[in-house]
């Protein structure tokens, strides 16, 4: 059995949680603030659009990651899971948005999964930790830009 991989990425932005959540919940914005090249909404969620149950597809080069939104707590948290794409199983991700004392937001992005192929865990963790950190940093910067405009 493969060993479980857990890690987190963190970033802080002067933007409020509303601005951060708005970007995080809208998959169409992701290509503008992450290394992701394209977004597609494969299936709407139970309340339509990108609500719980929605399947979002993010395409980066040859990788096509199908992700399902599991829970959304407006301006506070999003949980999702990867259904297919990267070589992993039993994936769980959570992005927490916590207000800072000065009106900004602390972003903490948690990832947990088991690698599909034995022996690939350290490499997959190394790559994904950097990728997710770039996403968190990009989200923080984009949220700040959206409130500065």
Image: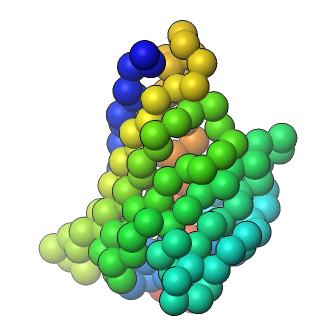
Quadrant containing the C terminus is: bottom right
The quadrant holding residue 23 is bottom right
Q: How many numbered discs, if any? A: 0
Is residue 92 shown left or right of residue 41? left
* Of the pair 54 and 123, the residue shown nearer to us: 54
**Image height check: is 80 above or below 22?**
above
For the point 39% across and 70% down, the residue is 71
Q: In the rendered view, how is the structure colored?
A: rainbow
For the point 63% across and 31% down, the residue is 87
Is residue 140 shown left or right of residue 76? right
Q: Is residue 73 at least partly visible in the picture?
A: yes
Q: Is residue 25 at least partly visible in the picture?
A: no
* Of the pair 105 and 131, the residue shown nearer to us: 131
* Of the pair 49 and 141, the residue shown nearer to us: 49
Is residue 123 shown left or right of residue 97? right
The quadrant holding residue 14 is bottom left
Quadrant containing the N terminus is: top left
**Image height check: is 148 above or below 37?**
below
**Image height check: is 129 above or below 102?**
above
Q: Position of residue 119 (x, y in %)?
A: 54, 10
Name, please, the residue furthest toward the left: 101
Q: Position of residue 143 (x, y in %)?
A: 49, 74
* Of the pair 96 and 79, the residue shown nearer to us: 79
**Image height check: is 1 above or below 70?**
above
For the point 78% across and 62% down, the residue is 38
Is residue 55 shown left or right of residue 97? right
For the point 68% across and 74% down, the residue is 43
Q: Position of residue 42 (x, y in %)?
A: 73, 70
Name, please, the residue furthest toward the right: 62
């Amino acid at each position: 059995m493969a060993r479980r991989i857990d890690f987190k990425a963190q970033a802080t932005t002067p933007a409020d949680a509303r601005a951060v959540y708005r970007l995080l919940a809208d998959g169409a914005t992701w290509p503008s603030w992450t290394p992701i090249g394209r977004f597609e909404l494969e299936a709407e969620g139970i309340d339509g659009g990108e609500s719980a149950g929605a399947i979002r597809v993010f395409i980066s080069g040859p990788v096509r990651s199908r992700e399902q939104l599991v829970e959304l707590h407006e301006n506070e948290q999003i949980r999702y899971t990867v259904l297919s794409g990267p070589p992993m199983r039993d994936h769980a991700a959570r992005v927490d948005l916590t207000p800072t004392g000065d009106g900004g937001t602390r972003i903490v992005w948690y990832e947990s999964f088991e690698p599909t192929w034995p022996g690939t865990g350290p490499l997959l963790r190394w790559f994904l930790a950097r990728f997710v950190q770039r996403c968190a940093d990009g989200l923080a910067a984009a949220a700040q830009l959206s409130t500065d405009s």
